[in-house]
Amino acid sequence: MELGLKIIMGCDLAAYDFKTELIDRMRRKGYIIADAGCHSSSKGDYPEIAKIVGESVASGRYDRGILVCGTGQGICMAANKVKGVRAALCYDVLPALLSREHNNSNVLATGAWIVGVDKAERIVEAWLFGKYSGGRHDLRIQQMDDMQGDKCNV
């Protein structure tokens, strides 16, 4: 696992306590993690936080982003609206690892209502450990990147 990665993490109000605990655990293991918010369990909209984290990763200020909301769905959808973000919604270790190896995901999303903090910690570590394998996956990554900004002509 790469302890030298610059990681930014954010959540909505539903996942505030979950995010706080996960950040604490990861920091105790030596990871440097910036907290993008939200900063309370009473206020915090997932699109705003997904935009902050997504833009921070897409710009190169951070290497990876981690997002949490109740289910992970909304915050993942919002993050994928940011050009340059490939957010993966993962509730288990294998999809997290494969999202790195096959899809070169740069943002991980998960759900505080779906997985416990113990499992989320394992998911995050597998995702941080994963390395993009390139090769046959490069074309698909390029196709996804090319889609960002395309207008629907239907």
Image (cartoon, grey):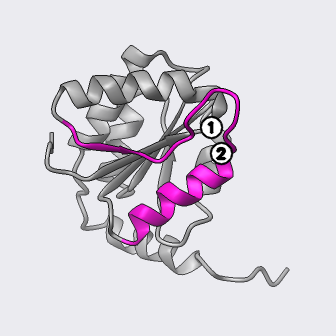
**Coordinates of residue 14 in the picture (x, y in percent):** 65, 27
Q: Which residue lies at the image location 34% right of the left edge and 64% below the top edge?
A: 137
Range shown magenta: 31-59
How many residues crowd mark 1 within 10 Å: few (<14), some (14–19), many (20+)? many
- Residue matched to label 1: 12
**Residue 53 vertical position relative to residue 113 in the rendered view, above or below:** below
Lateral position of residue 112 relative to residue 106, left or right: right
Mark 2 element type: helix
The N terminus: image quadrant: top left
Q: Residue 71: image x %, image y %?
A: 64, 30
| On screen, residue 154 above or below 57 | below
Labels 2 and 1 touching (C-beta < 8 A): yes
Residue 39 image position (x, y, % from top left): 55, 36
| Residue 36 painted magenta | yes
Closest to the observer, 88 or 26: 26
Q: Quadrant of residue 118?
A: top left
